[in-house]
Image (cartoon, helix red, strand yellow):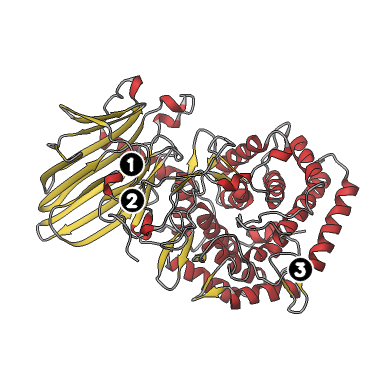
């Protein structure tokens, strides 16, 4: 199915960002997605989910390209796209300057947010076209655009944009256009600044100096990577992606910077991922800590503690960037959807679901952080004991599960495993760090949960773990059983589960979450392979000592990264296309941790599996 409008394949996009928001830049030179001033703000450029009339900024040759090459400057988030035509070659450099000094003492609503594009002629003289369509609120608002001596401004309500450039600009049908020729040795900077319309225009700055500063900043950050790995480049790119998806003022990490990129082209499984999921907590902590990024790990742990503070009955699976809890889901009928995949959604109703596994993630994250020397906040132990008191009353209740099913609640085996993890880590925290609480009762609960899972969460005819108690359906979430230490990797049920998933939930070498026809989830159609599940299978093989199988699967995953090293949420192994939101933090966390599992003496899988 062709994509709607002018959106390209998901894998044809690259990410630039400034730890406040992010933009997707296509191979064709078009920025088709950008939210100002935060990841979760209404999009200013929304062509990704509609067509160019919903907002975009394209810079490209005015004649056919012989070749298009792109890369990030080594170990940075500075993107370089080289266009070669019959007339010569031109380099377009895209980046977002970080807030001055990364100073978070300035209130976020007063901080400017900038995007810089620098056009440089390399050879010959190349005719170029710039096309900019300003829109606010996901393409629904056409701003008031005014010409200025150094560019133009666009204002609508509280939002304002200021484009500074030396190019001659012409207005055509609510579109700003410039047609020009770039000559070898010539450099033309273009800067776009978002600001509050009532606060006055931001000052100009030297775009080339900002480029130098951004390059040095990201390279300095990348040098903090401390692990020895044969996959260093892939890990650095994944770490940079995680950093780009971090909201600097709070330390929260968004699952992805996009909404509604479909899990199946033309389908309805289109969700908003511009929020922070508790489920990612422990995996993310290990990815950061074992790579040498202790400060970022501590900020993420502190975000987690603030987010879950309050009544344990109100703990959510996801929160906003600063821990916001109200994330109402609604649809945007104005947007036709990526590849005609509708509806386009903003917000995520899954934040109201009951998902018991998150309590295990919270407890494991706090325990893992302390094991690695990150001391808890004063009230962290109290928060943990209150959460455990609540979990004692609900661990046996049906829930929506790790995959946030919109169908009937079930006794999900994975949820029970993570309830076991919660009490297991509480016991370890008491024994190792003095966490106060009813340790005897916790031990009894841990043992009872373990007994119930082994009795009801296993298909005893096949000897495999199943998605729900008393059911038959496989679920790749059960690959986590050995990864969290519930059973050792050489347990026959663990081995049988991994082998069944490799045989029955895997197509063309990639792992699916489950089969919707076998485990109905309340939604029509199916989806593509879920990449984190493939990383989990590789981790299982690594723990079992089946290194060749682990490495073969890991290499297969590395091979599907796009040309600048990014991964989406899912992958269609038949169409060989990315699917789902992009880039996906969980996929990159999986890459980092599996690389550690295969290259370190003791990687995250060994750490978490230790009992």
Query: Disc 3 and disc 1: Cα gap in Å?
Result: 48 Å
Question: What secondary structure is marked by label 1?
Answer: loop
Question: What secondary structure is marked by label 2?
Answer: loop
Q: Which residue is mark 1?
A: 139
Residue 542's place in the image compared with 304, above or below, is below
Label 1: few (<14), some or many (≥20) within 10 Å? many
Query: Disc 1 and disc 2: Cα gap in Å?
Result: 9 Å
| Horizontal arrangement in the rendering, residue 512 relative to residue 175 (left or right) | right
Q: Position of residue 517 (x, y in %)?
A: 59, 70
Residue 490 appears in the rendering: no
Q: Which residue is mark 3?
A: 470
Quarter of the figure that contains the C terminus: bottom right
Q: Position of residue 409 (x, y in %)?
A: 69, 56
Q: Which residue is mark 2?
A: 50
Which circle's residue, 1 or 2, is located before the other in the chain?
2
- Asked if the residue under mark 2 is in contact with the one under mark 1, i.e. CB atoms within 8 Å, the reply is yes
Which circle's residue, 3 or 2, is located before the other in the chain?
2
- Name the image quarter holding residue 545: bottom right
Label 2: few (<14), some or many (≥20) within 10 Å? many
Q: Count the marks: how many?
A: 3
């Amino acid at each position: 199915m062709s994509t709607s409008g002018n959106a390209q394949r998901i894998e044809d996009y690259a990410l630039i960002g400034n730890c406040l928001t992010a933009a997707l830049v296509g191979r064709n030179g078009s920025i088709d997605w950008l939210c100002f001033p935060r990841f979760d703000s209404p999009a200013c450029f929304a062509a990704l989910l509609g067509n160019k009339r919903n907002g975009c900024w394209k810079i490209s040759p005015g004649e056919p390209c012989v070749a298009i090459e792109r890369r990030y400057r080594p170990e940075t988030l500075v993107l370089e796209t080289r266009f070669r035509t019959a007339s010569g070659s031109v380099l377009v450099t895209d980046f977002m300057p970080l807030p001055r000094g990364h100073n978070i003492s300035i209130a976020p609503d007063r901080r400017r947010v900038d995007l810089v594009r620098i056009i440089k002629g390399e050879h010959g003289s190349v005719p170029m076209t710039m096309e900019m369509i300003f829109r606010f609120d996901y393409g629904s608002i056409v701003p008031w655009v005014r010409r200025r001596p150094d560019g133009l401004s666009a204002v609508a309500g509280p939002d304002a944009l200021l484009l500074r450039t030396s190019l001659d600009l012409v207005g055509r049908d609510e579109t700003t256009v410039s047609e020009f020729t770039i000559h070898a040795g010539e450099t033309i900077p273009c800067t776009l600044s978002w600001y509050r319309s009532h606060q006055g225009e931001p000052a100009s700055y030297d775009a080339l100096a900002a480029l130098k500063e951004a390059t040095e900043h990201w390279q300095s950050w990348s040098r903090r990577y401390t692990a020895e790995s044969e996959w260093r480049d892939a890990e650095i790119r994944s770490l940079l992606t995680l950093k780009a998806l971090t909201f600097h003022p709070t330390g929260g990490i968004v699952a992805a910077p996009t909404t509604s990129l479909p899990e199946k082209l033309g389908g309805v499984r289109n969700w908003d991922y511009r929020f922070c999921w508790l489920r990612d907590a422990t995996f993310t902590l290990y990815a950061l800590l074992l790579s040498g990024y202790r400060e970022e790990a501590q900020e993420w742990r502190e975000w987690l503690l603030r987010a879950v503070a309050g009544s344990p009955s109100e703990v959510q699976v996801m929160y906003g960037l600063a821990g916001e809890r109200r994330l109402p889901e609604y649809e945007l009928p104005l947007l036709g959807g990526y590849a005609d995949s509708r509806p386009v959604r903003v917000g995520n109703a899954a934040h109201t679901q009951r998902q018991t596994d998150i309590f295990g993630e919270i407890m494991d994250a706090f325990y893992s952080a302390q094991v690695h020397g990150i001391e808890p906040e004063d009230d962290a132990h109290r928060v943990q004991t209150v959460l455990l008191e609540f979990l004692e009353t609900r661990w046996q209740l049906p829930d929506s599960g790790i995959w946030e099913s919109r169908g009937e609640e079930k006794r999900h085996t994975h949820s029970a495993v993570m309830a076991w993890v919660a009490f297991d880590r509480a016991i370890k925290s008491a024994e190792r760090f003095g966490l106060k609480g009813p340790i005897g009762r916790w031990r009894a609960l841990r043992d009872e949960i373990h007994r119930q899972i082994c009795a009801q969460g296993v298909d005893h005819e096949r000897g495999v773990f199943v998605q729900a108690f008393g059911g038959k359906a496989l679920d790749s979430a059960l690959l986590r059983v050995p990864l969290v230490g519930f059973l050792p990797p050489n347990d026959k049920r663990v081995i049988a589960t991994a082998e069944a998933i490799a045989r029955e939930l895997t197509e063309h070498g990639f792992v699916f979450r489950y089969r919707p026809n076998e485990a109905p989830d309340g939604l029509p159609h199916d989806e593509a392979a879920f990449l984190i599940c493939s990383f989990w299978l590789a981790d299982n093989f690594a723990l079992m000592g089946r290194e060749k199988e682990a490495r073969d699967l890991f290499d297969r995953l590395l091979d599907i990264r796009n040309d600048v090293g990014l991964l989406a949420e899912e992958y269609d192994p038949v169409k060989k296309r990315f699917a789902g939101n992009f880039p996906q933090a969980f996929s990159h966390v999986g890459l980092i941790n599996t690389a550690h599992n295969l290259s370190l003496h003791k990687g995250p899988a060994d750490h978490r599996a230790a009992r």
